[in-house]
Image (spheres, grey):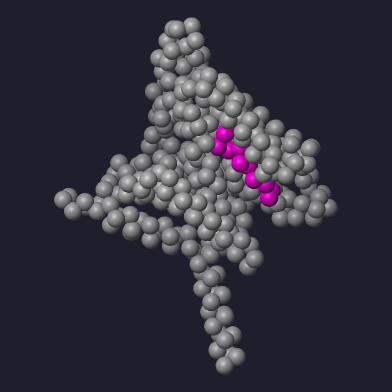
């Protein structure tokens, strides 16, 4: 009898281990099959979910979510939590569009300046966390609200578009370059996303900087005693987080062609979910780039499928919140096993 109980416990543990390790991929496959048949068009004898246009829409959404989530992943490696990524992306969206429409700047100048200015958010986070000893989440939350207000103030509370009316009653003369708009379309947006993911994967796993960041996140005191400058790598993590969140915001501008109010903020929750889902992918038990990409695929597919099923937007928040809760449960289950 005791042997049977022990055997049952072993089976349940192995099943739980399998679920936490491969649950994300299994869920992606199940959702793909479900949405394919849930959006079946009997007249055409095909699924509208599987159309080329819809697949491109999903990939575009996944690309931006993955890039912003990669930014969050860097802060998670040092056991931080950069909740300002949405506000950062939104600020970058407004900055790059204003440089085109208001100041008629070139593509490279506008992109580089936008990312450099957005690094200020990373520096403020670093100062509050490292120097002022404010908890990571609280500090990032304060900068999130701060720069949401800064972006709104900068744009006078409205969107930035071509030919928009300025304060003096004249129309803005600057135009968004077609080459910039191309960055928000396939294949370039996919290429940029893959470059970001591959860079993050190699940086975190095959460079001393990435390994030191993991060491800081795992045990900061042990890292300090072994000679690792803990504060330096926490600052680096938040600067990287700000950089990639800004890049995501720039791609939002390229995709939409305008800077809309709180456009970047809409990516906060999906990015957080993607990054935390990434913890449990393949039993990693830690923030990682490939896992974050898998999380972005899951979240992007879920959002798209729910929209195609005409699920109300307020109900979608319930479902996305549930997905995040499950991701967190799997994350901490994986941590316990490791």
Image vertical order of residue 192 relative to residue 147, above or below: below
Q: Is residue 86 magenta?
A: yes
Left or right of 214, for residue 9: left
Task: Give the percent coordinates (x, y) of residue 79.
Answer: 68, 50
Q: Horizontally, is 230 left or right of 207 in the view? A: right
- State the residue at coordinates (42%, 10%): 171
Residue 216: percent from the left, percent from the top?
73, 50
Say if 186 sits above or below 213 in the image.
above
Q: Nearer the viewer, residue 179 or 26?
A: 26
Q: Residue at x 38, y 37 (%)?
A: 186
Q: Is residue 278 left or right of residue 40?
A: right
Q: Which residues are magenta?
A: 78-88
**Residue 284 appears at what percent x and percent y?**
58, 60
Query: Which quadrant does the C terminus fall into?
Result: bottom right
Residue 325 pos. (x, y %): 54, 56
Q: Which residue is rendered at x = 21% and y = 51% of the image?
A: 41
Q: Quadrant of the N terminus?
A: bottom right
């Amino acid at each position: 009898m005791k042997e049977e109980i022990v055997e049952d416990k072993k089976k349940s543990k192995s099943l739980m281990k399998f679920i936490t390790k491969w649950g994300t991929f299994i869920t992606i496959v199940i959702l793909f099959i479900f949405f394919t048949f849930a959006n079946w068009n009997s007249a055409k004898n095909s699924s509208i979910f599987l159309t080329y246009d819809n697949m491109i829409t999903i990939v575009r959404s996944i690309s931006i979510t993955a890039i912003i989530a990669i930014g969050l992943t860097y802060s998670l490696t040092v056991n931080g939590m950069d909740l300002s990524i949405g506000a950062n992306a939104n600020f970058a969206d407004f900055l790059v569009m204003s440089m085109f429409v208001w100041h008629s700047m070139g593509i490279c100048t506008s992109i580089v300046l936008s990312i450099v200015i957005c690094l200020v958010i990373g520096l403020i986070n670093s100062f509050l966390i490292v120097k002022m000893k404010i908890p990571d989440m609280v500090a990032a939350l304060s900068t999130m609200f701060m720069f949401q207000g800064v972006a709104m103030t900068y744009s006078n509370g409205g969107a930035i578009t071509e030919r928009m009316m300025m304060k003096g009653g004249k129309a803005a003369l600057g135009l968004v370059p077609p080459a910039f708009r191309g960055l928000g379309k396939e294949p370039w947006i996919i290429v940029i996303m893959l470059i970001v993911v591959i860079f993050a994967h190699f940086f975190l796993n095959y460079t001393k900087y990435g390994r030191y960041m993991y060491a800081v996140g795992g045990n900061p005191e042990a890292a300090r005693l072994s000679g690792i400058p803990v504060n330096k790598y926490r600052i680096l993590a938040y600067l990287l987080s700000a950089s990639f969140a800004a890049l995501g915001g720039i791609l939002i501008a390229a995709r939409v062609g305008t800077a809309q109010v709180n456009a970047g903020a809409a990516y906060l929750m999906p990015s957080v979910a993607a990054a935390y889902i990434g913890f449990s992918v393949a039993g990693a038990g830690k923030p990682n780039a490939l896992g974050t990409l898998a999380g972005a695929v899951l979240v992007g597919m879920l959002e798209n499928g729910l929209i195609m099923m005409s699920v109300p937007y307020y109900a979608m928040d319930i479902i996305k919140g549930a997905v995040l809760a499950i991701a967190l449960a799997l994350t901490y289950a994986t941590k316990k096993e490791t």
